[in-house]
Each structure stands twice: as structure tokens, then as C-alpha cells.
Amino acid sequence: MQEFIIRRIIYTVFTIFAVATILFCIFRIMPGDPTAQVISPALDEASQARLKEAFGLDKPLYIQYGLYLKGLVTLEWGRSFTTSKPVFEILKYRFWNTVFLMGAAMSFTLILGTALGMIMAWKRGGPLDVSATVSALVLQSAPPFVTGILFLMILSYKLDFFPTGGMNTPGERLPGGIAMLFNTDFLHHLVLPAVTTAFYYLATPMLIMRDSMLEVTGSDYIELAQAKGLSPRTVMIKHAARNALLPVFTVSSVLIGFALGGQVIVEQVFSWPGMGLLMVEAASAHDYPVAQATFLLLATLIIVLNLLADITYCYLDPRISVSGGKQ
Amino acid sequence: MKFSIVKDFLVAQYKIIRGNRFGMFGAVILLFFGVIALLAPYIAPYELWESLRDSSGKLAILRHPSLEFPLGTTAMGRDLLSQLILATRTTVLIGLTSGLVSILIGANIGLLSGYYGGKLDEVFMRFTDIVYGMPFLPFLIVLISLFGRNIWFVIIAICCIIWRTSARVIRAQVMSIRQRQYIQAAKARGCSNFRIIYGHIMPNILPLLLLYTAFNIAWSVLAEAGASFLGFSDPNNITWGGMLYNLWISGKIRTAWWWFATPSICIILLVSALVFISRAYEEVANPRLKQR
């Protein structure tokens, strides 16, 4: 098992490195002046040349690549073109805002999805089964900006139940760090974006839990539990559901990766000051240092989450590491 | 001879779709959008960016749906019905092209990786892992903002990412088929690898391929809609996501419900049609689903 984990960690480092390299290449082969990604074209000729030298952009590509990698590791991600703040300082807050939102949304979707999937398999073919399948598939087909705007139109503009965006009411200060999570104003702002994200991804855990439950209920040990005279509720929850959770767990890491990539839209609709919104702002303003660093941070987050899921999975299902890796 | 194979294939597909209530619904919707996409330039009553005046000569700004403008107008006095029809064409073009190209990439990587195994498999799967690490929409945004707002860059960017899921799933399926006796028999008979992969294995994963073709098209449509909603799309061609972007930046989101409704419904209808069709194929690819 140890060998499996070590190999996975090496793969992870390699993957992050590869993503960073691909990003470096993309920014270099872009049309126009590639140095425009580090030095604002708005500056005059002389200061551009001075900055080029300072950033090492007059050097050959392989040295630039080395400098780029060194900068990534030492957290020197350059300065924003638009605000001239260090990129790291900007991202520090944005990172946690996205993580909080995603954490809330994904917990909600996974808990609701598995619970619904369990009940659907239990009462298969019933009205709940059919209606939940259809509505989850339709929700999956509705992009988050459609559901998000719909929520805003009904729940915010019309009924005024929820704020229209942002993380806090203007004028009210949010406490920093963990204390923010217990701030009612913050939680009030969190509801709509989290629910919008959760609904979009609900179908996957729900349908997988349903299928996996149906698979499990055919097993011998379930029949044995039933033969022992246990109540259907006990059999379903204690015996079937626990074992059916494994495939949901497997898919959840991929799902969270997809959700982090799609986060951009929800943050835009609800003006949530996370990495996604930063990404859009930076890309529209051609603020390349910010765009590049945000992209890499998102990618790293996804890759590391996948690693954690793999390691946990390997403890939950030891067959994986014995057979030498996921098939 | 060749024609009869094609005919048998089409009849078989028709039966699969026909046998499934939701699949049938999906097929009808798909056909509907297909026809609109083909005829778009001929049936759209106005030009895409034409600012219209009503019968009394006033600019028709933010009109509710009426006889004159069946779906209403935008903040610039543009006809929403015409925009919707022309957007269907662009959306279908982008969705279909990137869906088909990406399944071509994904299927081939999955087939080769699953069939040959070993070093090739290792290389392909590490590469797939890398692509799995890419956040999809940020990748689209970066690529489009760097290379230019143009339909073809949108398609290329979508194709770069979307093949990943199909490659993994098809690889797993091929690995289990590779062990079957008829493949071993074909090998013993001296069939070339090419023939085994495309002549013997591929027909057996056809339902899976079609399932993921439908999925890939659906994801392409969603991805494109997302990118255009964020403002990263070709400014010369409108898509449903782009119509919603125009609404969003016009700031009329509180009042102009008609402007919001139709493009949203179109996206949901098209994507769910594709999802329902893929569900129909899922029941063929995985027959146990149906028995339950």
C-alpha cells in the first residue's frame, strides 16, 4: 500500500509540473508579443526594456522556463498589471473564498445525492424514483448561469429572501479566517451560489448511488441480513448503503475537479470574490500574471484533491493497491 | 453490400431510440434543432444586429413578446426570435463539431491504450491525468483570450479537454473485451492489430461510443454556453450563451424575463435531449440498468 501511495504522489508532482509546462508553452506561443504577459504593454519603451531585463525576458527560452518554475515554487508569481499588487497577495483570499463555496456546495450535493439515490433504489420504479431521475437529468442540463439567474430573479429580486451577490452586505465587515464561517451574513450570502452549484452536479452522485444500491441489494449478505429478520430500514441503511457508497466516493473526486473548473460561472453570476471571478476579470483585462497563477492554483487544487481521494480510497478498498492500481 | 450494413446500423439505432420513451423525446427535439440550424438564414425574419423600429417609427427597445416581435426585443432593439434562430445554427455547429472531434480523439486513445497496454497505455493515461487536472472553463477562457475570440478557437479549446472522460471509459471497456475468446481467436488467425481494434473491438463498444458521442456533444454545448456567457465568444456570431451574456451586461436582468427565458429553455432542451438519448444507449451498453 505504501508503494502505491508513493507512486501516486510522484505522479501527482509530475502532473502539476506538466500542467505548469503546458501553461508556459501556451503563454509563449500566443500571437503577438509574448513578453506582454509579464510586462504591461501600456508602459513606455524604456521601462519595458528595463523590466524585460529584470524579469529575464531577454534571455533564451530555456532559462526563462527555469526562472518561471523557480518563481512558482518560491511563490513569486509576479504583479498584477491592473492593480500592481503581488499576485500571491491577491490569490491568498480568493483561494479560501472559492474553497468555502465549493466545500459547502459539494457537501450539500453529495449528502443530498446519496440520500436521494438510496431512497430511489429502495422504492425503485415509484413516483419518487422516476421524478427524481428526470428532474436531476434536467438540472444537469441547465447550465449554472440559468439556474443561478432564475434563483436571483425569483428569490432575490422578487421575494427579497436572499442577497443578490457578494460575500457580505456592503458596509458590514466580515471576520477573517474560520470565524467567517459562523458569520450569519456570510452564510446568508453563501446559500444561493452553493445551492446553484449543488443542483447542477446532483445527478451524478444520485444516479450512481441508485445504481450501486441496486447492485448491492442483489448480494448474498443482503439476503442474509433480510433472512435474519432485520427491518428493511436497517438492511437498507446499515448494510446496503454503506457498501454502495464506494462508487459514489470514487466519482466524487472527479466531480469536485469538474466543479472547480465550472466554478467560474457561479462566481460570476453571484459576484462571489473567488478564484473563478478573478480568472474572468484577469482574462478580460489581459492581466496575464494573475490569469496564469489563478489557473495553476486551480489545477493544483484539482490534482491534489484527486490524490487525496486516491489515498483515502486505497484505505477504504485495499483491493486497489494489492492489484497494483486503479484499472 | 456496404449499403445494407449502413441500413442495418440505422435500423438498429432507430430501434434503440424508439424503444425508450425519453430517447424518443430526445430524438424529436434534436431533429427540431437540426432543422432550424440548417434553415436558420432563410427563416430568421431579421438580421442579427439590426436595430428595429415599430410601426410608429420608434426604436423597438425591450419590447415584450407580441405579434410584431414574437419573442420580444433586446435593449438595443434587436429581434430575439431572429437571434435565437441564428444562435441555434452556431450552437449546433460548435456542439456537433467539437463533440465529434473529441469522441474521435477519446475513442482512439481509449482503444489503443486499452488494446496495447504496457508503455503506450502508461503514456496515454498519464497524459489523460494531466488533462483531468486542467480546470475546463478557465482553460477555455485563457485559450480564447490569448488566441482570439473566434469560433474555431472555441472548438479547439473544447476538444482539447472534453475527450478525457470518453478515453478513460472506453479504455476500461476495451481492456475487458481484449481478454475475450473471439479476440484471441482473431489473433491466432493472424488478424492485424489494426483489424482487431477497428474491426472486432470497436463494433462491440459501439453503444458506449454513441453514448459518449451524445455526452460529448452535450458537454460541448454547455461549455460553449458557459464561455459565451462569460463573454468569451466570437463577437460576429451569436450563440444562446452569448444572448444571455448580452442580457447580463445590459443590466436589464431584473425586468427582461423574456430575453432570459427562450435562450435558457433552448440550452436546457438541447442538452437534456442529448442526455436522454445517451441514457437510452446506456441501457443498451449496460443491460442490467433496464431490468431493474
Image: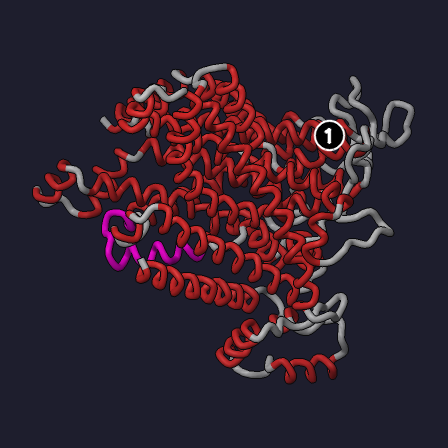
Q: Which residues are magenta?
A: B112-131
Q: Nearer the viewer, residue A208 or B232?
A: A208
Give the image location of residue B228, x and y in percent. Answer: 64, 44
Q: Label 1: how many residues lie within 10 Å, few (<14), some (14-19) or many (20+)?
A: many
The quarter holding residue B127 reads bottom left
| Quadrant of the image containing the C terminus of chain B | top left
Numbered disc 1: secondary structure:
helix
- Name the residue at 16% across, 40% down: B183
Give the image location of residue B198, x and y in percent. Answer: 25, 41
Q: Is residue B196 left or right of residue A127?
A: left
Residue B280 to residue B121: above or below: above
Residue sticking out furthest to the left: B189
Q: Please, what is the dominant secondary structure of the magenta stretch?
A: helix
The quarter holding residue A3 reads bottom left
- Name the residue at 36% across, 24% down: B289
Q: Is residue A37 visible?
A: yes
Q: Is residue A139 left or right of residue A47?
A: left
Q: Is residue A102 left or right of residue A90?
A: left
Residue holding disc 1: B80
- Name the residue at 36% across, 51% down: A314
Q: Nearer the viewer, residue A19 or B228?
A: A19
The stretch drawn in magenta includes residue B130: yes
- Name the residue at 47% across, 47% down: A253
| Quadrant of the image containing the N terminus of chain B | top left
The quarter holding residue B10 reads top left
Q: Which amino acid lies under the numbered mark 1 shown in the image of this protein?
A: Leu
